[in-house]
Image (cartoon, rainbow, N blue to C red):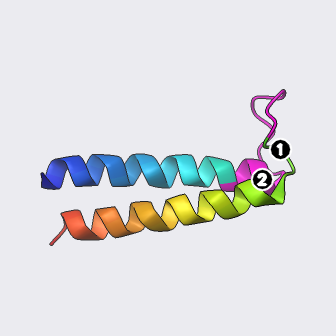
Amino acid sequence: MKALLLIVGVLSLAIGGLWIGQGAGYIAWPSESFMINQSEWAYYGAALAIFGLVLVALSRR
């Protein structure tokens, strides 16, 4: 169970970071993405990254 929490947490952190970068306009990949320069996606990414951090912390207990 701890390994699953860690894997899902790390994936959530990575995807959240991508969403933050795209929403803020720092990452323009893929170029046809609808999330580029859309600030709400930066907020969604931040929420997902925080969720990932919580899962990683729970996996380390």
Residue beneath the point at 12% across and 51% down: 1
Q: Of marks 2 and 1, which one's residue comes earlier in the chain?
A: 2
Amino acid on which the number 2 mark rests in the picture: Gly
Part of the protein shown in magenta: 20-34
Q: Magenta: predominant secondary structure element?
A: loop
Residue beneath the point at 28% across and 70% down: 57
Split into 4 quadrants, where in the image is the C terminus?
Answer: bottom left
Mark 1 surroundings within 10 Å by alpha-carbon count, few (fewer than 14), some (14 through 19), many (20 or more): many
Q: Which residue is mark 2?
A: 23
Is 29 magenta? The answer is yes
Residue 44 in picture, x, y percent from top left: 64, 58
Residue 56 in picture, x, y percent from top left: 30, 63
In contact (CB < 8 Å): disc 2 and disc 1: yes
Amino acid on which the number 1 mark rests in the picture: Ile
Q: Is residue 28 left or right of residue 17?
A: right
Marks 2 and 1, how far apart in space? 5 Å
Mark 2 surroundings within 10 Å by alpha-carbon count, few (fewer than 14), some (14 through 19), many (20 or more): many
Label 1: which secondary element: loop
Q: Which residue is mark 1?
A: 36
